[in-house]
Amino acid sequence: MPELRLRINGEDHKADVAPQVSLLDVLREHLWLTGTKKGCDQGACGACTVLVDGRRIVSCLALAVQYEGREITTIEGVDHPLQEAFVRHDGLQCGYCTPGQICSAIGMLSEHAAGAPSAATEALAPEALTPAEIRERMSGNICRCGAYNGIAEAIQEVAS
Amino acid sequence: MDFLRPSTWDEALAAKAAHPDAVPIAGGTDVMVELNFDRRRPPALLDLTRVAPLTEWGTDGDLLRVGAGVSYRRIIEELGSRLPGLAMASRTVGSPQIRNRGTVGGNLGSASPAGDAHPPLLAAGALVELASVRGVRRVPVDGFFRGPKRSVLEPDELIAGFLVRPGGAQQFAKVGTRNAMVIAVCSFALSLSLETRSVGTGIGSAAPTPLRATEAEEFLSRELDWEARGPVPPSVAQRFGELVAAAASPIDDVRGTAAYRSHALSVLARRTLAWAWKGFREVGP
Ligand SMILES: Cc1cc2nc3c(=O)[nH]c(=O)nc-3n(C[C@H](O)[C@H](O)[C@H](O)COP(=O)(O)OP(=O)(O)OC[C@H]3O[C@@H](n4cnc5c(N)ncnc54)[C@H](O)[C@@H]3O)c2cc1C
Ligand code: FES
Ligand code: FES
């Protein structure tokens, strides 16, 4: 088995894993970084969202070996105003989806700041982050507890 | 399981020739689902993400050539004005996280009848570039699909990219229960070229493979008032919708009935026609 070297939250990590192992399983099962959650293991819930070089991806569908040499950020490495805002706006109930929601929202805010359009964007370049834009742009993250209103409000507050 | 990790295109082709049963992996958004659920245990994985040319795009004569490894995010952000139909379809793929990783090459590789990149590529008359150590061939995309999840790709071949003629008015629309992360009930792409006065179509999720509605294309290119760009008569739009629906061979499944799909296709066809033609009338070619 090849030795895997990953850079996570600014630190170097090593793990011996089979090549087909997902980044999510390496984080949780090999490195004990269990803040990143597994909901579906098939890309559909967003609970496993992490940032790679600042972009959000679902770590369950990421082959760990493809991420050597990249800068990976998990919830353990996040220190962002969104975290307080989620608490203030009741953006969570059980909290299982929250690490993914936060990482996803961080990625989303920087995508929007860089001018990326969404399916809700009429014009070629988006302007304000409207509630409809926030919901569309966060549509890759599901919350089983249905804390969507609080999540959207928390993101809205930090965005403006 | 072997893990093959070429860093150049030549190495990738050599690896595929030496290991024809190796499964290529690009964004992994289809392959990883199969691996995670043990639906597939290939003898080897062939990682294509280190092969730089696959992630590049540029011009090839008067065609635009896009590498197989360009993600949906980049299609949206970098090619939105050149390939508007494909960019519109890309905006609806999965979720932002999926679009950051998923590639058009992977969509072609999976060859699902519901692949959202396929209708706009069909409508634009794209060529798929396939390569192996034996050489390179360019296959018109409407000859690429062979059946559900089957294509003309040979075991020793890789998808290098696709080529399209940019320009014209393009539209894409899909029906699903929500916008994010649903497999389309059906989808439709339209491409109109003032220059060649031609019409291109692509239908998704309504037959064993994505397909063109050739009769509808011929009908519409005859009937449109290309010269004055006058309004499309309702009877023409109606007939175009019927011909698009007639080209499909939908089935009943959990996502929708065949009858619903046919009806929805004719609506999508009329709607995209109205949008695309309006674009011409407002901004010109
Ligand atoms: C939650 C979720 C939602 C999704 N929603 C949509 C959707 O709305 N619309 C849609 O169309 N798809 C959707 N998909 C499917 C998937 O994201 C797309 O098919 C995507 O385009 C696959 O690209 P990839 O780079 O991730 O492919 P991979 O998973 O890396 O590969 C897919 C297939 O193509 C082959 N392949 C990849 N690159 C090459 C190459 N260069 N040469 C030869 N073979 C190659 C692989 O061997 C594999 O068979 C969804 C998937 C998930 C998990
Ligand atoms: S666990 Fe990765 S998206 Fe659900
Ligand atoms: S807070 Fe429970 S799943 Fe979102």
Image (spheres, rainbow, N blue to C red):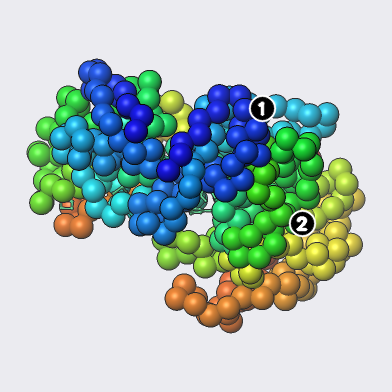
Q: Residue at x 82, y 32 (%)?
A: B62
Residue B274 appears in view: no
Q: Residue at x 55, y 28 (%)?
A: B6
* Image mark for residue B143: 2
Q: Residue at x 82, y 68 (%)?
A: B215
Instruction: Give the Cα separation between the discs numbered 1 and 2.
Output: 26 Å
Q: Quadrant of residue B147?
A: bottom right
Discs 1, 2: same chain: yes
Q: Residue at x 46, y 72 (%)?
A: B255
Q: Nearer the viewer, mark 1 or mark 2?
A: 1
Judging from the image, mark 2 belongs to the subunit labelled: B
- Would you say B7 lies left or right of B85 here? left
B67 versus B140 height, above or below: above
Q: What residue sits right under mark 1 in the picture?
A: B10
- Would you say B201 lies left or right of B92 here? right
Residue A101 location (% of width, % of height) = 24, 42
Tally the numbered discs.
2
Q: Quadrant of residue A109?
A: top left
Q: Which type of secondary structure does the marked residue at label 1 adopt?
A: helix
Q: Is mark 2 within 8 Å of ligand 1?
A: no
Residue B131 appears in view: yes
Q: Residues within 10 Å of mark 1 (few under 14, many from 20)?
A: few
Judging from the image, mark 1 belongs to the subunit labelled: B
Q: Disc 2 residue type?
A: Gly
Please tell me which residue lies in front, B121 or A82: B121
Q: Which type of secondary structure does the marked residue at label 2 adopt?
A: helix
Residue B134 location (% of width, % of height) = 77, 38
Point out the image quarter for the N terminus of chain B: top left
Q: Disc 1 residue type?
A: Asp
